[in-house]
Image: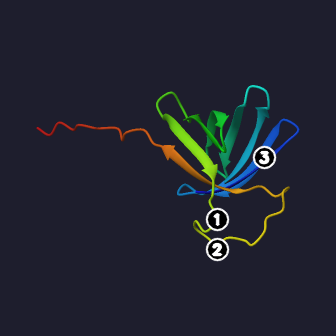
Amino acid sequence: MDLHLTFAGGKMTGDGNDDVGRFLIRGQYDEKSLECSWIKTYVGAHDVFYRGFREGKGIWGTWKITERFHGGFHIWPKRAGEGEAAAASIEAAAPAPAVAEEIAPRPLMTHENKD
């Protein structure tokens, strides 16, 4: 997943793309509780709801599309040299690229009776 997030004034914004497609991020965060929540909206498709907590340099928590489709995630900043070539310097105001892992639900099992 390629993900760019910006945190300012209690608001979270961002964008990126993954195996499903291009998406936008809109949400909020609380500096005191370290809690954040946001909606990932796939362009022309569905929304995914996230709730997480900052821990160190990452965010961990849960995602949910419906009661049936949900799981956990962990997002952390990309390390220098990981993926694309590392930039020699990064402006402090620029959002850091992130690496994310979504833990997908197990596939639904179906059974067909063939008589």
- For disc 1, the neighbor class at 10 Å (few under 14, some 14 to 19, many from 20) is few
Q: Which mark is residue 96?
A: none
Q: Residue at x 77, y 34 (%)?
A: 29
Instruction: Compare marks 2 and 3 and give the one earlier in the sequence.
Output: 3
Q: Which mark is residue 13?
A: 3
Q: Position of residue 63 (x, y in %)?
A: 57, 36
Who is closer to the viewer here, 56 or 52?
56
Location of residue 58 by image quarter = top right
Q: CA distance from mark 3 to mark 1?
A: 23 Å
In which quadrant will I find the N terminus?
A: bottom right
Q: CA distance from mark 2 to mark 1?
A: 8 Å
Mark 2 residue type: Ala
Label 2, secondary structure: give it: loop
Mark 3 residue type: Thr
Q: Residue at x 11, y 38 (%)?
A: 115
Q: Position of residue 3 (x, y in %)?
A: 66, 55
Q: CA distance from mark 2 to mark 3?
A: 25 Å
Mark 1 residue type: Ala
Q: Nearer the viewer, mark 2 or mark 1?
A: 1
Who is closer to the viewer here, 106 or 28?
28
- Residue ID for mark 2: 85
Q: Residue at x 67, y 45 (%)?
A: 57
Who is closer to the viewer here, 83 or 39?
83
Instruction: Compare marks 2 and 1 and give the one earlier in the sequence.
Output: 1
- Residue ID for mark 1: 80
In the rendered view, does 103 fall on the left or right side of 4? Answer: left
Label 3, secondary structure: give it: strand
